Amino acid sequence: MSQRNIFSAIDIRSDKIICLIAQELEIINRGKILQLIGIGISKMPINCTKPLSLPHAEISNHLKGAIKKAENEANAKISDVFVSISENMTSEYIDFNILCKNSLIIERDIKDFFKSKLFTSLYTKLSEPLHSFPISYRLDNKKSVSDPIGMKANNLLTKWHIISVPKDYLEITYKILQGMELNIKQIVSSNYSTSLAVLNDIESDLGSITIEIQKNKTVLSYTFDGQMIGFDIIKIGTFHFTSDISQIKSLTLEESERIRKKIDIYDKDKKYDKDIEKFYAIYLSRAEELTNLISAAVTKTRFNSLVSNSLILTGYGAKSFVIQKLMKSKFINSSFRLGSTRKINGTKTFIDNPSLTSSFGLLTYATNHDLEGEISNDRKKKKSIFSVIYKFFQNL
């Protein structure tokens, strides 16, 4: 063992704050591996749906609690962190054209976008870009390619998918963490970090949908050719199941949340539970609604032809046997599976938990991505796959 690097991630969610600390080890004959060495979790109030709207002292205490637990377990002090957020994101598409003068296209040509007025104009008083994905390329207004690096052309047209977030929302995040003397390396969309955690290379290249059931919503993220090409949001999450039980049965949210979690792992085909059955119909009704909305969103999305062959269910509510069964019956013609973390070593209790995928995806991001606009010194040649994506977007 010759090298040890530490990475830390903080996932800010409405159900919990999660802090992860991992070390990257370079081991002879095995290369680099990422090993989880510390995890800290601070659970949010049951009625919390927007964590950054909590009073400053309250959200700070939750963050400090999660960080302290992770640091104690890892026996390490963190200072630089990658942070994920899950609210208030929008997307748009921008075409960027550059003149190459029949010379070989290099990575710098693509990343010239970050120096252009098209990109800098995205920084306004109200919002700024969080992620920028180059999702299709066209050479000389004719040839669509998966990767133009090393090719010759007079013109290169790149279509970019931009995810933006309100500036005041980002400022709150920076203010809270900088007040704790933490340096934010980068803020990442939880939608994106989740897809990084759960997708294998084939799913990422050939197209897939990551369905993440969060506490206050469900996010459908569409990935093709290794890039996130879009997402949809359904405003139903696990809190709505809990709220239904609470209102119909006149129970507290805390009591209803405990019942919801029991129903999540209840398989009525194997064992009948009289007490759970009192609430099962309420839960099932909401599960059917959510599944129907997911099915409708997948059917209606303009990305359907690119991504609908592979669906991965993950997130806080993904452990529900009921939802898993309903999803399998809805998408019988697609490959469907439960998503857990890949590419990170650690205790299976954490690694296999779909509720933690957005958090582990942050670590994957930290070890595999350059900061926006940087030129990579270790660029791997992208696999060439069937180049249909530019034609697809051209016809939208």
Image (cartoon, rainbow, N blue to C red):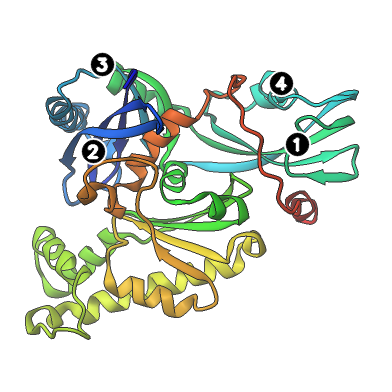
Q: Is residue 97 visible?
A: yes
Residue identifier under label 2: 17
Nearer the camera: disc 4 or disc 1: 4
Residue 158's disc is 1
User: Which quadrant would residue 246 be assigned to in this image?
Assistant: bottom left
Q: x and y percent of residue 222 in the render?
A: 55, 53
Residue drawn at 61 percent across, 32 percent down: 380
* Residue at the disc numbered 4: 108
Query: Which residue is at the front of the view, 68 or 37?
Result: 37
- Residue situated in front as seen by the camera: 267 or 253: 267
Identify the residue at image location x=25%, y=19%: 78
Place of residue 51 in the rendered image (x, y in percent of width and height, measured from the top left): 27, 39
Check disc 1 and give the amino acid type: Thr
* Distance (Cα) linking label 4 and label 2: 37 Å
- Residue position for label 3: 179
Q: Secondary structure at mark 2?
A: strand
Relative to 246, is 370 above or below? above
Locate the N terminus by quadrant.
top left
Name the secondary structure under disc 1: strand
**Rounded to the nearest whole Å, what is the CA distance between mark 3 and mark 2?**
17 Å
Comparing marks 3 and 2, which lies closer to the viewer? 2
Mark 3 / mark 4, whichever is N-terminal: 4
